[in-house]
Image (cartoon, rainbow, N blue to C red):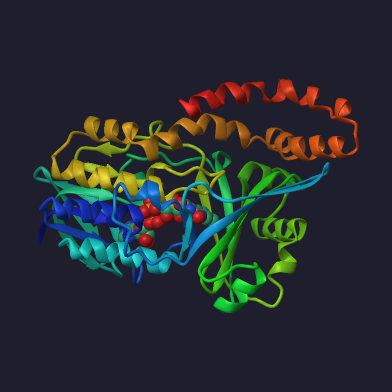
Amino acid sequence: MEFDVVVVGAGPSGSVAAMTASKAGLKVLLLERGPEPGSKNVSGAMIRPTSIQNYVDLSSAPVDRDVKRVDIGLFSSQGDLKVSFRPSSRLVTLSRLKFDKWLAQQAENSGATLITKTTVTGIEPSDGKKKVLTDRGIVEAKSVILSEGANALISMALKIRPEFSPKEAVQAVKEVYSSTKDDITRRFGLSGDEGVAFRFFIDYPLPSAGFLYTYKDSISIGVGAPINFLLEKKVRPSDLLEIFKDRTGLNEIVKGMSLREYSAKIIPEQGFPSWKACSEGIYLTGDTIGLINPLEFNGIGPAIASGFLAGKSVANSSSCYEYEKSLYQDKEISEVIRARPLVRELLKPEKMSTYINLFPRLMNSWISGNLTDSGVRQFLPKIAKDLILSFGVIG
Ligand SMILES: Cc1cc2nc3c(=O)[nH]c(=O)nc-3n(C[C@H](O)[C@H](O)[C@H](O)COP(=O)(O)OP(=O)(O)OC[C@H]3O[C@@H](n4cnc5c(N)ncnc54)[C@H](O)[C@@H]3O)c2cc1C
């Protein structure tokens, strides 16, 4: 059977790529190895609908909670500091199982054919076309979009995407706890479908960044740290999560809830444009080309943006140069790219620790009436480079 384009992976980037190419009139096949879209994903996420709305209409998307408060916490040897914000733009939480299914449904509604329980095992050239090999047979296509996520075996086998060293990656671990809608609402002092999100940082035994998100009837807690810190300090990822919950008091919050899921995933610190996003009619999207900020855990927006651009590029028979240029010029994606040098710098243990300690120390000196002795002066040379790098992020 022959298609104009075969999309590998029905995550956010693959489904949006399939939807965009179908809407342009192409014959599209979307292949997913899981029993259903979303089933292979680390479940639950927080997204910014306003930025995603530019690529896909989210008006009927299955949203769990509207996040009305974000708590930022710095837990340091200098003391603990917590600040609450009301987000200035809309943030929502959603279940990945429901959201990925809904996105794949949008692709089907646009005319794409979705086939699940099918793993792509390789891609071979065939008379100017591509032969897509799967564990259930072979299909032919003029183009292929690889939206296979971070563990991009096909892209690496084709040598389009390099393998990255674990030393240039963040190890993320996550737990999901189940409860009832009323219990979540009561525990977090919410009302109706309101939600809350925590972004916490700890400085000991190794500086790490984590989160808590509230969903309809569950919560997720996750934490990430560069793999080289974990190796150096001999801390296992599962132990890091326990330390994080203990240090931030989240252990108390989850008491009485039932643990439903534990998962671990690696997030590369590198990616496009250091990595190629395209080669001879094969277009790569989302996590496959590292479009994620490992400090913010923000990857769904850039994944959707790249899927949209890959779908358009295939429909317009754009060259690799044109596709990569469009990625570079996209607002969502360029934010990830521009932030990368700063993020890499902030992921250094001594740097992360400096920031986690800076504000609690400042506040502590202030309430002790001893601001002149706050030690801020000694921090200034350490943060000067970041101030310069942040100009790259602001643009
Ligand atoms: C702990 C953690 C928390 C996160 N939280 C957030 C968050 O709150 N907000 C946010 O925006 N981002 C978050 N992210 C990032 C986000 O999950 C990713 O950036 C996003 O899922 C990338 O989408 P994608 O389509 O590129 O890849 P994926 O979502 O990984 O989808 C890839 C799909 O391809 C399928 N597949 C792979 N190989 C094959 C194959 N050979 N054949 C067929 N199918 C295949 C997989 O089964 C999967 O369905 C988080 C990440 C982690 C690790």
| Among the 4 quarters of the image, the one containing residue 187 | bottom right
Q: Would you place residue 25 above or below residue 271 in this image?
A: below
- The residue at 32%/65% (across/down) is 60
Q: Would you place residue 254 above or below residue 3 in this image?
A: below
Q: Quadrant of ligand 1?
A: bottom left
User: Relative to the observer, which residue lies in front, 233 or 38?
Assistant: 38
User: Relative to the observer, which residue lies in front, 27 or 199?
Assistant: 199
User: Relative to the observer, which residue lies in front, 36 or 371?
Assistant: 371
Give residue 349's position: percent from left, percent from top: 69, 37
Image-based side of 381 in relation to 132, left or right: right
- The residue at 52%/23% (across/down) is 391
| Among the 4 quarters of the image, the one containing residue 76 | top right
Image-based side of 291 in relation to 114, left or right: right
Q: Would you place residue 182 above or below residue 315 in this image?
A: below
Q: How many marks?
A: 0
Give residue 52's position: percent from left, percent from top: 36, 49
Image-based side of 123 in relation to 34, left or right: left
Give residue 171's position: percent from left, percent from top: 58, 50
Image-based side of 279 in relation to 176, left or right: left
| Among the 4 quarters of the image, the one containing residue 58 | bottom left
Quarter of the rendering occupied by the C terminus? top left
Quarter of the rendering occupied by the N terminus? bottom left
User: Relative to the observer, which residue lies in front, 357 or 262?
Assistant: 357
- The residue at 65%/67% (across/down) is 188
Any part of residue 151 in sight: no
Give residue 115's position: percent from left, percent from top: 24, 68
Any part of residue 378 in sight: yes
